[in-house]
Image: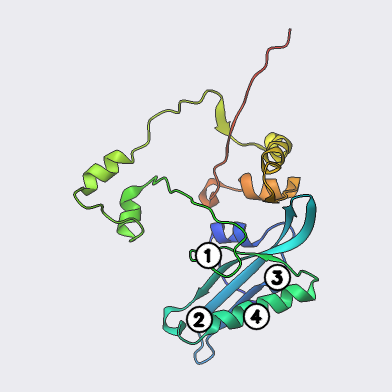
Amino acid sequence: MVRFDISPFNCRALLTPDHKKTWHVGLRATHNDKRKLCAFISGIPVTIRVRNNTFASVEINFLCIHKKLRSKRLAPVLIKEITRRCHIEGIWEAVYTAGVVLPKPVATCRYFHRSLNWMKLYETGFSPLPTGSTKERMVKRNRLPESTSLPGIRLMEEKDVESVTALLGTYLGKFDLAPVYTVDEVRHWFLHTGDEETRVIWTYVIEVLSLVK
């Protein structure tokens, strides 16, 4: 188990309603008083449905190692340790993602980024400047419109949690492999709680008003 200060985003991702502290594994330096975190891996409980079979599993995420230690073979050590801790809890299946093809993949996907602040992404090195373009042109290209084209769209509220859970369950039911969300999990992952300074989630719903005679 590791204790350290985390951002609001990581707090949301790691501290799920049924999280286990023993599934937050970190390695710290011991040669100085600062005890800097050198490597980390985490797991959170998830429920997975494969066709008609539902079972408890774990989602492995945030595997990171200090760049000066990436030749020390720490990744297999962390993976082996988190696997051991999951086995203690009776969990024998895990879900994880990778940007490369690993042995026995069960699914592949393609995802797209919508740049909301292209200049910031460029300054941090995430988004490159395309050949033949300029910074001003990229900012203009990624500028958002002043208003949306969807009528009835608004931020998700507490009163929407059960409806969103039902709609999400119906949508995920179309797939052979999908996570199963409880009401508490939908509230945790999609609904912002707290002050605006710590907001990391913006979920929008479209409210359809029906006329009843």
Q: Residue furthest bottom?
A: 31
Q: Amino acid at mark 4?
A: Lys
Q: Is residue 82 above or below residue 172?
A: below
* Badge 4 density bin: few <14, some 14–19, many ≥20, Cα 10 Å: few
Q: Amino acid at mark 2?
A: Lys
Cβ atoms under marks 3 and 4 closer than 8 Å: no
Q: How much space separates mark 4 and mark 1, taking CA atoms?
A: 17 Å
Q: Residue 122 falls in which quadrant of the image?
A: bottom left
Residue bearing the label numbered 3: 21
Residue bearing the label numbered 4: 80
Q: How much space separates mark 3 and mark 4, taking CA atoms?
A: 17 Å
Answer yes or no: is residue 126 visible: yes
Q: Amino acid at mark 1?
A: Ala
Cβ atoms under marks 4 and 1 closer than 8 Å: no
In the picture provided, is 35 more to the left or to the right than 141? right
Q: How much space separates mark 2 and mark 1, taking CA atoms?
A: 26 Å
Residue bearing the label numbered 1: 98
As rendered, which of 155 and 54 lies closer to the eye? 54
Q: Secondary structure at mark 1?
A: loop
Residue bearing the label numbered 2: 36
At x 50%, y 83%, the residue is 34
